[in-house]
Image (cartoon, rainbow, N blue to C red):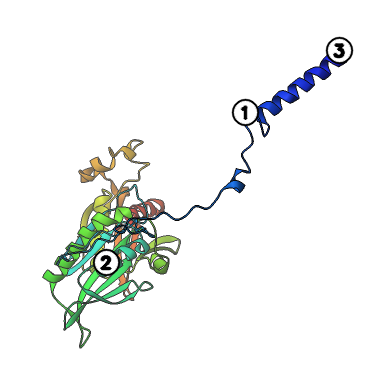
Amino acid sequence: MKIKNSLIASIIFLSSCSYINGPEGLFPPTQYNFLKEKVEKDIILPENLDLVADENHYPVLEIEEVMKDQNVPKPRQIFASSGNSSVQLRRLGELMWIYIETLPSTSWPISKNYWDTSAYEVKSTNPNTGEIIINFDENSTLNMKIEHGIKEASTEIFLNQVNKENNEIQSNLPLIQSELENIVNYFAESVDSFTGTSLAAQNLNEMKKAKIFAENGQTVIELNLNFDRAWSSVSKAMNASNIVSNDLDRSMGIFYVSYISEEDDGIFSFLGFGGSKNASNKNTFNDDSQFIVTITEENNKTYVRAVSKNGKIEEAEELLSKINESLS
């Protein structure tokens, strides 16, 4: 009896499914309805209307008037940067240059973009040597040179006006200063947008102006600078490091300085309580804290050495390291 009832229920269920989803049911299948579609005749448009076949989604506006004497625009942003880079115009006598706290391979595309978007004609560029030559006027060119700075990951940019006939540098400080100031402003607005690097200018990153080597067991700083710039850079570094200069002899390239090791200066020296206090009072230094820092020029390079008057080699090494950290 149970089997008979199950069979009757199955027949009723199947018939109900056919009634709902079958071809004659309430919801017939529609997957083959497209076979019954017919192509209708084209729409007949009124005579005053035309059928648009293409639509321009990005129309180009016509420029009615071209502005003249436009300021050099900022370069397009290629890489985002969250840090700040220092850009300074520096001068030593008649020598002026731009100092930037970024790699030369990053400074190269910004410098190149500056001249490419300026009113001047760029005659040639060489990323391997960091040179850009600009056609300034009928008689002269502007030669820009991008170099690695003294400090790690820094750039120095020099600019000279050169005579086209004899290739001699012309002394025109007002012009050079004006052009360098424009470049400084351009870099100040642009350098934080560039943290990438130019592959073509990678060679400039290796041409550092400061190197360290050992000589008879002691450290020596080698600077690819003339004596005047080396003397100025070392003086600035000692001031930045709170190293007291008791006396000096520029003709001999000698600084007589007082310096106390950070360990001897107290555990709070890293907060600035020790060094700055001692730097303001020369009487706090004893004979053991007296050193000589020398700058010598050999083969177009300068060498910085530090010697303790009492033979304290470790302290002399620390003193030289302090100077090296603040060189720029």
The disc at residue 2 is: 3
Q: Is residue 278 above or below residue 60?
A: above
Cα separation between marks 3 and 2: 101 Å
Q: Is residue 214 shown left or right of residue 160? A: right
Where residue 48 sits: x, y (%)?
29, 58
Q: Is residue 299 above or below residue 182?
A: below
**Residue 325, numbered label:** none
**Compared to 85, does 171 lie above or below?**
below
Quadrant hosting residue 109:
bottom left
Kindly indicate the quadrant of the structure image that contains residue 291. bottom left
Pointer 3 or 1: first along the chain: 3
Residue at the spot 87% in from the left edge and 16% down from the top edge: 3
Total marks in image: 3
Judge from the rendering whether residue 29 lies leftward or rightward of residue 85; answer left or right: right
Residue at 41% x, 54% y is 43
> Dot 2 corresponds to which residue?
157
Sequence-wise, which precedes: disc 2 or disc 1? 1
